[in-house]
Image (cartoon, helix red, strand yellow):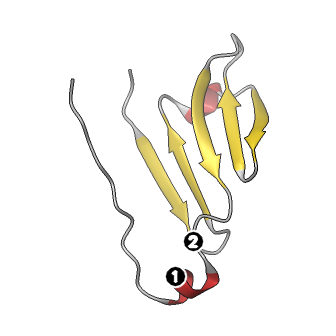
Amino acid sequence: MDKLRVYFDRKGNTLSVWFCDPKKEHVCEEADNDVVLMKDRRGQVIGFERLNYLSPKQRKEETGIPVEVQMV
């Protein structure tokens, strides 16, 4: 697996997580309300995007984004 990339767009209020190179994205598919899956040419999920990540109140405050990391 490539490096894990996490991007938070405060203005767009989205959180994007990539499991490999974003340039490999071929198609996006809405998985659920406010969740989009990014897939490569083989249909493998290579990332996801969470729309409307923070509430308007949270966006106005300086909010940290909690991250849990597990190494296996």
Name the residue that disc number 1 marks.
Answer: 58
Give the residue displayed 60% in from the left and 40% down from the top.
48
Picture quadrant of residue 2: top left
Looking at the picture, which amino acid does disc 2 mark? Leu
Label 2: few (<14), some or many (≥20) within 10 Å? Answer: some
Looking at the picture, which amino acid does disc 1 mark? Gln
Name the residue that disc number 2 marks.
Answer: 54
Give the residue displayed 63% in from the left and 17% down from the top.
44
Q: Secondary structure at mark 1?
A: helix
Left/right placement of residue 26 relative to residue 70 reads right
Q: Is residue 72 above or below residue 29?
A: above
Give the residue displayed 68% in from the left and 69% down from the top.
12
Q: Is residue 7 above or below residue 25?
A: below
Q: Quick check: marks 1 and 2 in contact, CB under 8 Å? A: yes
Name the spot of residue 29 as percent of width and height, x first.
Answer: 78, 34
Q: Secondary structure at mark 2?
A: loop
